[in-house]
Image (spheres, rainbow, N blue to C red):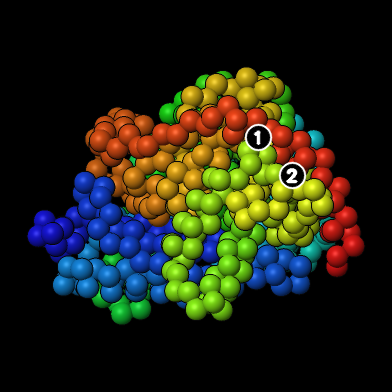
């Protein structure tokens, strides 16, 4: 502890802050990449006028409360004040749309990745570029606003992601890490820049609109892992630390998205490695050794934080409905006078799921809080349904909600494995889905028919990942790649715990998926008739 106190006092630390869908988390690590303190703040998106959003007030309140929680934890654990930090990294959920005018004012409420209102734009841009543009990408939001003739578009001076916005306000720099940027607009991986041919195609496509801007003028500048992305200004320090004790001048790494920090936190930046992040949404990232043979609307092409091509399978919905059902059991426990904390409750229910039938006994569930592109749903309705003869047990009930959290992901991963013949020997898992030991791993291994490894540090998640990227910027030697740095200096003694699915579980998940895909019309009917 004395060594850690000294590192805190001398600023020999790095700080990572990540804005997740339901929690903002800050992790302070020492020079050995070990977390020494963390802070968090719970928040939730709001559906306003048909748009999933977070207000600017909530963004800054969340950041300040999260950082203050970290400061308090440092004081409690080490009896010192946090006033110096060696490097800082900001990360957030990817995609979405934040557009600003010349005065830096937000033109329309932040449109998050969760919105599925851009189907026309995504379809047209995919056709124009012959490159898959998902609905949640920033360029799809911009083009949809153009198609809808929204008045604000003519006033745009800059647009970026949530991580890019926060970094801009803390440092004054309009930059973005290449991994986060790859969820805004397609990347030329050879030149580590936005694809210039596609930018010209976009400008030509909207030329008749007569806007005063060109696309390249309103996009952020790109940086790769290891580069410095500015320093914390005095104004930024005051924004972050409401006590105004934090010293400015701290170097900051390029702001990144949660996909890039997930790859970093699981040492999955090398070719043929893969990781899966499962929480409010779920996505798998596979670093490719060669380009895909053709365009697949179900597969996104993004990059690692150092600019290498990645196939990304993303589903909007994962654990939200599962968590809601656990909440019902929490209410029952309280009603029955049983004292259980959330960890105990999840542990009991998840372990019970392991006793269920391999195919969930014929139960069916869709945890769709929002639309799901993989299954052509523009809106979501959480749904549970069963036949009279289905085996309606507690074990099967929890198991089916764990299975369905992975259903849409399974569809996309099957395209990579069965149509593109992508080889994958192991998946590294992280996120809330894996918090209960072994259970989430076993379900994911059954779904993917691939061994799944969870590291001891998996619970730290993206906030630890962006802290590692800040550490890489601060400590890496000349010409040392991100892969080398992670392998030899971060993960040398952390191989993780691997689980391989049984043949019975793999077959059971396949049987569940047959029913899952055949039952999609039930979910579509719920959307149509349950207004």
Q: Is residue 485 visible?
A: no
Residue at the image point whose x is 53% and y is 64% from the top: 22
Horizontal arrangement in the rendering, residue 477 relative to residue 161 (left or right): left
Residue at the image point whose x is 64% and y is 67% from the top: 53
Mark 2 surroundings within 10 Å by alpha-carbon count, few (fewer than 14), some (14 through 19), many (20 or more): many
Quarter assignment of residue 329: bottom right
- Height in image: 9 above or below 500? below
Residue at the image point whose x is 46% and y is 66% from the top: 342
First of labels 1, 2 by sequence position: 2
Residue 3's label in the rendered image is: none
Asked if the residues shown at circle 1 and circle 2 are in contact, with their CB atoms under 8 angstroms apart, the answer is: no
Residue at the image point whose x is 17% and y is 68% from the top: 78
Residue 485's spot in the image, x, y percent? 30, 35
In the picture, the quarter occupied by the C terminus is bottom right
Nearer the observer, 156 or 259: 259
Horizontal arrangement in the rendering, residue 141 relative to residue 270 (left or right): right
Residue 508's label in the rendered image is: 1
In terms of secondary structure, where does tag 2 sit?
helix
- Height in image: 212 above or below 286? below
In three-dimensional space, the C-alpha distance between marks 1 and 2, rounded to whole angstroms, equals 10 Å
Nearer the observer, 61 or 22: 22
Residue 9's spot in the image, x, y percent? 15, 64
Residue 266's spot in the image, x, y percent? 41, 40
Quarter assignment of residue 1: bottom left
Q: Which residue is mark 2?
A: 362
Q: Is residue 483 visible?
A: yes
Residue 442's spot in the image, x, y percent? 51, 39
Mark 1 surroundings within 10 Å by alpha-carbon count, few (fewer than 14), some (14 through 19), many (20 or more): some
Nearer the observer, 257 or 522: 522
Horizontal arrangement in the rendering, residue 333 relative to residue 438 (left or right): right
In terms of secondary structure, where does tag 1 sit?
helix
């Amino acid at each position: 502890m004395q060594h850690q106190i000294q590192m805190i006092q001398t600023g020999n630390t790095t700080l990572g802050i990540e804005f997740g869908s339901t929690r903002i988390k800050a992790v302070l690590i020492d020079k050995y990449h070990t977390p020494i303190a963390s802070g968090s703040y719970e928040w939730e998106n709001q559906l306003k006028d048909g748009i999933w959003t977070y207000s600017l007030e909530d963004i800054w309140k969340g950041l300040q409360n999260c950082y203050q929680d970290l400061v308090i934890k440092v004081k409690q654990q080490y009896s010192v004040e946090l006033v110096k930090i060696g490097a800082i990294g900001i990360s957030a959920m990817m995609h979405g749309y934040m557009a600003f005018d010349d005065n830096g004012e937000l033109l329309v409420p932040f449109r998050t990745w969760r919105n599925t209102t851009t189907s026309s734009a995504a379809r047209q841009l995919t056709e124009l570029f012959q490159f898959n543009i998902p609905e949640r990408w920033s360029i799809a939001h911009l083009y949809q606003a153009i198609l809808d003739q929204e008045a604000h578009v003519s006033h745009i001076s800059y647009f970026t992601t949530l991580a890019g916005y926060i970094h801009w306000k803390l440092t004054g720099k309009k930059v973005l890490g290449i991994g986060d940027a790859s969820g805004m607009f397609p990347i030329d991986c050879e030149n580590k820049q936005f694809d210039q041919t596609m930018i010209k195609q976009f400008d030509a496509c909207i030329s008749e609109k007569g806007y005063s801007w060109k696309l390249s003028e309103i996009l952020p500048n790109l940086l790769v892992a290891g580069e410095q992305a500015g320093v914390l200004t005095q104004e930024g320090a005051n924004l972050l630390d409401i006590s105004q004790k934090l010293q400015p001048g701290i170097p900051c790494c390029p702001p990144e998205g949660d996909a890039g920090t997930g790859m970093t936190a699981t040492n999955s930046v090398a070719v043929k490695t893969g990781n899966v992040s499962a929480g409010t949404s779920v996505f798998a990232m596979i670093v490719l050794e060669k380009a895909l043979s053709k365009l697949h609307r179900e597969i996104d092409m993004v990059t690692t934080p150092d600019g290498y091509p990645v196939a990304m399978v993303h589903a909007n919905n994962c654990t939200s409905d599962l968590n809601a059902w656990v909440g019902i059991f929490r209410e029952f426990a309280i009603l029955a006078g049983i004292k259980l904390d959330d960890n105990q409750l999840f542990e009991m229910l998840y372990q019970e799921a392991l006793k269920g039938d391999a195919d969930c006994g014929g139960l069916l569930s869709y945890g769709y809080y929002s639309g799901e592109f993989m299954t052509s749903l523009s809106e979501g309705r959480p749904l549970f349904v069963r036949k009279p003869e289905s085996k309606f047990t507690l074990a099967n009930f929890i198991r089916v909600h764990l299975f369905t959290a992975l259903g849409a992901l399974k569809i996309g991963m099957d395209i990579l494995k069965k149509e593109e013949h992508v080889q994958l020997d192991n998946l590294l898992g992280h996120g809330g889905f894996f918090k209960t030991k072994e259970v989430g791993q076993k379900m994911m291994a059954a779904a993917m028919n691939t061994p799944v490894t969870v590291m001891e540090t998996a619970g730290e998640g993206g906030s630890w990942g962006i802290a590692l990227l800040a550490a890489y910027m601060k400590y890496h030697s000349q010409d040392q790649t991100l892969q080398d740095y992670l392998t030899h200096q971060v993960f040398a003694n952390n191989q993780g715990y691997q689980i391989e699915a049984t043949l019975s579980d793999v077959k059971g998940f396949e049987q569940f998926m047959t029913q899952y895909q055949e039952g999609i019309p039930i979910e579509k009917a719920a959307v149509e008739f349950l207004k």
